[in-house]
Amino acid sequence: MRSELRFQLAVAVAAVATSMFAGYAVSQTASPTLASPESFASIADTNARSVAMFTELGKVLMHPRCTNCHPATDRPRQGDEGRLHQPPVTRGADGHGLPAMRCSSCHKHANFEPGRMPGHPEWHLAPREMAWEGKTVAEICTQLKDPAHNGGRKLEELIHHIGEDTLVGWAWAPGGNRSPVPGTQKQAGALVEAWVKTGAACPAQ
């Protein structure tokens, strides 16, 4: 019985290790840059400039660091390739996992680099209505403007949420050889602010 348990544990550890190294290989291709709002000043039409800035922000919103925690189902994803989370956890009633397997059981207050385990005090999935996985930039834009699908936030509140929220900020310092989202959180917040101030226009569907 003990030998069987040891074998199962060894297989699980090997699977996790393989997935981590696979994620490392993909992470080397991520773009590190994010354009500033000022770089769009040459676009004279305000609506077109607003669309261009949100499209640039899409580099962040559609990155695996974000979409993995904004899944289309109740299963989070992981890695740069967006594979299903292992072990097979699910959202739970509050987004923090099921009673028997809470997110905090593994994800502690900070990244645990020896185990390449991401962490944050409020580690959890985004609400179901905020699912981004598989959506286009235009669809995410429309969703972010709708309080019923953006966590009940006004547009102005999105500036703080994307530009200053520390859980969102984890995406820029994910550790474990995961590729961070482009630019900096401050730059992303500046893009959101400029987008809002120019009318929060969305790309065409």
Image (cartoon, grey):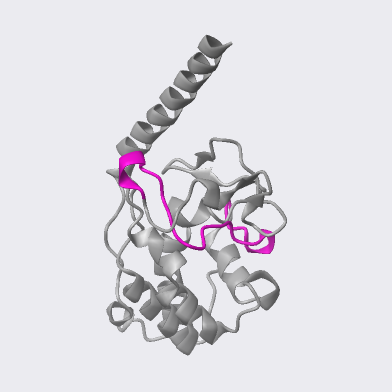
Q: Which residue lies at the image location 64% right of the left edge and 57% below the top edge?
A: 95
Q: Is residue 25 above or below residue 34?
A: above
Residue 162 covered by magenta stretch: no
Q: How many marks?
A: 0
Q: Where residue 162 sits: x, y (%)?
A: 45, 73
Quadrant of the rendered image containing residue 165? bottom left
Q: Is residue 135 above or below residue 203?
A: above
Quadrant of the rendered image containing residue 65? bottom left
Decide if residue 20 is on the left or right side of residue 154: left
Residue 120 covered by magenta stretch: yes
Q: Which residue lies at the image location 43% right of the left edge and 26% below the top edge?
A: 13
Quadrant of the rendered image containing residue 164? bottom left
Q: Quadrant of the C terminus?
A: bottom right
Q: Quadrant of the N terminus?
A: top right
Q: Where residue 155 sits: x, y (%)?
A: 56, 83
Camera sees residue 198: no
Decide if residue 44 is on the left or right side of residue 33: right
Q: Which residue lies at the image location 70% right of the left edge and 73% below the top edge?
A: 148
Q: Where residue 79 sits: x, y (%)?
A: 43, 42
User: What secondary structure predominates along the stretch shown in magenta?
Assistant: loop
Q: Closer to the camera, 121 or 35?
A: 121
Q: Where residue 21 sits: x, y (%)?
A: 34, 32
Q: Is residue 142 above or below residue 109?
A: below
Residues shaded magenta = 112-134
Q: Is residue 69 above or below residue 78?
A: below
Decide if residue 160 is on the left or right side of residue 95: left
Outermost residue, front direction?
A: 2
Q: Closer to the camera, 140 or 45?
A: 140
Camera sees residue 162: yes
